[in-house]
Structure formats: C-alpha cells, structure tokens
C-alpha cells in the first residue's frame, strides 16, 4: 500500500514539473512559448548599468567627458519636464541600451489642496519664483481677517474678502487668475509660467488657501521645448560628431 502511495506521489510530482516546464509551439510559422522567458545574450551584447543623476549639467558633462562610452548612434529622450534619458540606437534584436537617466529634484507643492495661512505662505516662498502676482497673493493671504471670507459672494471666478491694512480692515477682490512660476523642472532652464485660480475659504482654524492649475498642462510642452533647446545648445558639437538625436 505504501509503495502504491509513493508511486502516486511521484506521478503527481512529475505532472507538476511537466506543467511548469516551458513549452515551445510553432503556429503558422511563428514561435511561441507558454512561459515568460528572459533572453540571454552573448558577451558581445553586454549592457552597461544605468547611471542616475539629477541635473542636465551632469548629463551634458557625461556626454562631453566620456564619448568612448557612447555607441555609434544615441538618442536623448525628453520623457517629461522632470526626466531625460540617454539611449543608444537600435542594437541586438532591436533593443536599446540606457546609459543615463536625469531626474529633476523639484519641490512638491500640492495644487488643488487647501493650506492653512501659515503653511501657505511658507510654501509660496519655498516653491515659487519671485513675481509680481506672487507678491499680490502673499499680501492678500497674509493679511486676510479670519471669519470674513464666508460672508462674501463667490461667483466661481472671483471672491471678495477682508484684509487688514494697518489698524483698519478693507474689502478686496481676490486676484484671479494669477500668473506664477513654480519650481517644477530642471533648474538649468527657465521655469515656465502658468495661470492659476487662487481660492480662499474659512475653516475652524482660520482662513485656508489653495491654487488650482488653469492652463491645461500647457506648461509641460513649454518646459520640454526649453530642455530640448538647452541640450541642443550645450551639445551643439557632440550632436553631429556622435550622431545624437534629441527628441521631446
């Protein structure tokens, strides 16, 4: 009886191993496998490990300083306003080698989220370039009297509230839209300007403020264009010598 049980277990184990083994099928001249398998290449196709940096300057310095590490053709792919990747042209089995990735370090201001008065003022100074509209909303948000915002009409675009001017209080129209330039791409290029809706509301802890993006993401196209222009200028000689294509 025990011998029969042993044989049954061995048979079941064999079925399991057989089911786990990859099976190669030919269907209408195409080869398929029922398992996900990683292709291993010969020594001639060894890929370099990817370098990770945080500035466009480092990317430019690498291309200028290590031309011997580049392949016959290269691609600088501007993936987003925060990321640029350096790839080779097509190589073995139409793969590409990624040599470097540049990822911008940006302060994360939470758009479309309310901040209390003190935190909002700190975030504005930390995350935005100094502009006239920034001064305006800082003046308004820094001097609003608690408990007054909810008493005024709001037509969806403009709000009227009360700010303290010296020892007196004055009714003011909250500015909308405002033109601001937050830090949100590589520092080597000019930060793009965008329109924002500035909103104010009262809460139990006092006035709260938020900024809502109002340009439909057009700033991303502007930022990527400026990154492309920067790279083409800084690498004007290398682009032709090393057959580097910049795409955005």
Image: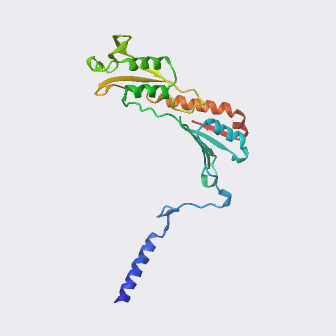
Quadrant of image for the N terminus: bottom left
Q: How many marks?
A: 0
Dividing the picture into quarters, in which one does residue 47 lie?
A: bottom right
43 in relation to 1, above or below:
above
In terms of depth relative to the viewer, which is nearer, 215 or 112? Answer: 112
- Report the residue at 71% width, 39% height from top: 64
90 in relation to 78, above or below:
below
Q: Position of residue 26 (x, y in %)?
A: 50, 65
221 in relation to 161, above or below:
below
Is residue 120 visible to the viewer in this orientation of the structure?
Answer: yes
In terms of depth relative to the viewer, which is nearer, 236 or 58? Answer: 58
Q: Residue furthest front?
A: 167
- 13 vs 42, left or right, is left
- 150 vs 114, left or right, is left
In terms of depth relative to the viewer, which is nearer, 12 or 179? Answer: 179
- Report the residue at 62% width, 60% height from top: 41
- Report the residue at 34% width, 23% height from top: 200
Q: Position of residue 182 (x, y in %)?
A: 49, 27
- 73 vs 119, left or right, is right
């Amino acid at each position: 009886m025990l011998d029969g049980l042993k044989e049954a277990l061995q048979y079941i184990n064999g079925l399991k191993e057989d089911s786990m083994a990859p099976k190669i099928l030919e269907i209408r001249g195409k080869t398929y496998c029922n398992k996900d398998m990683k292709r291993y290449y010969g020594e001639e196709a060894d890929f370099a490990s990817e370098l990770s940096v945080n500035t466009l300057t480092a990317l430019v310095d690498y291309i200028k300083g290590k031309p011997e590490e580049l392949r016959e053709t290269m691609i600088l792919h501007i993936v987003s306003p925060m990321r640029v990747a350096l790839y080779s042209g097509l190589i073995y089995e139409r793969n590409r080698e990624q040599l470097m990735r540049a990822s911008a370090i940006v302060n994360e201001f939470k758009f479309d989220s309310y901040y209390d008065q003190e935190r909002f003022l700190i975030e504005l100074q930390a995350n935005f370039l100094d502009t006239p509209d920034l001064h305006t909303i800082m003046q308004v948000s820094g001097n609003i009297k608690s408990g007054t915002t909810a008493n005024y009409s709001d037509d969806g675009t403009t709000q009227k509230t009360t700010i303290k001017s010296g020892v007196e209080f004055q009714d003011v129209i909250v500015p909308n839209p405002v033109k601001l330039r937050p830090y949100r791409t590589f520092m080597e290029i000019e930060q793009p300007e965008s329109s924002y809706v500035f909103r104010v509301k009262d809460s139990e802890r006092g006035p709260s403020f938020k900024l809502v993006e109002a340009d439909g993401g057009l700033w991303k196209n502007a930022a990527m264009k400026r990154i492309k222009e920067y790279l083409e200028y800084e690498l004007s000689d290398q682009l032709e010598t090393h057959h580097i294509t910049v795409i955005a």
